[in-house]
Amino acid sequence: HYVPRLTPEEKETTGHDPVEEKVSEIEEQLRSNGEVPYYIPNGCRSLHGALGYAGCVREVVEQLHGLNLAPDYFVSACGSVSTQTGLMLGSELYCQAQAKVIGISVSRDQDYITKKLTASVAEAHAFLGLEGLPAAEIIAYDDYIGEGYGIPTPEMKEAVSLVARKEGIFLDPVYTGKAMAGLIDLIRHGELRKGENVIFIHTGGVPGMFAEAQVASLQF
């Protein structure tokens, strides 16, 4: 909480008001003052955010091409579905939908994720005029959420510790930790096999490791 105190941005709280209504009110106030607001929704879920991860796939594919490799799977945490939408779009654009995209849900059940992804991918197709592209398969797992969003699981703790010790890469307990727990479990159960090129997308969140409440809850 120290860093936000160093910067001069103004903050508004919604109280009991619906968030979207409060945002619309603030946007209108800013426009009336001649300013141009840009709203970043909760979870950064937006079409533009999804397009960024389509670009991520392009970059990965280009780098792998230099090694005479091609991705078989992309694996990421899935919350607001923007990341998985972008990865699926990238697979369609740059892998002819041959690279499968696996989303490991950190909060929602499989049915919810599937419906949101269907709508989100359709929106991206319409925006880019890409109707008729080979469609990427929707693959989402809700087996690794545990008791709920942000609540640590034994599998997440194992994954965070294992990757830190073996690779020197730090995962956060809310998103990438549970996503890696899912990836490890899929490997152990043979759904992902030796010889396949699996790309794990680290979506960030490491500062969460330094939050006192998060660290206390991990108890490695």
Image (cartoon, rainbow, N blue to C red):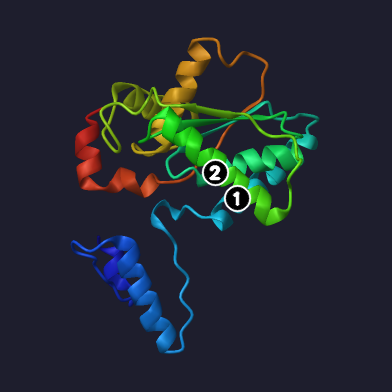
Name the residue rendered at 35%, 63% in the picture.
20
Q: Residue 179: give x, y in percent of width and height.
A: 44, 31
Name the residue rendered at 45%, 55% in the picture.
44
Looking at the picture, tell me which residue is in the foreground, 44 or 131: 131
Residue under label 2, please give it.
119
Residue 164 seen from this side: no
- Report if the CB atoms under discs 2 and 1 are less than 8 Å apart: yes
Answer few, some or many: residues within 10 Å of disc 1's Cα (few below 14, many 20 plus, some between 14 and 19). some
Q: Residue 93: give x, y in percent of width and height.
A: 74, 42
What is the quadrant of the N terminus in the image?
bottom left
Residue under label 1, please give it.
123
Residue 201 seen from this side: yes
The answer to whether 33 is drawn above or below residue 3 in the figure is: below
Label placed on residue 37? none
Q: Assign a secondary structure to mark 1.
A: helix
Looking at the picture, tell me which residue is in the foreground, 121 or 37: 121
What is the quadrant of the C terminus in the image?
top left
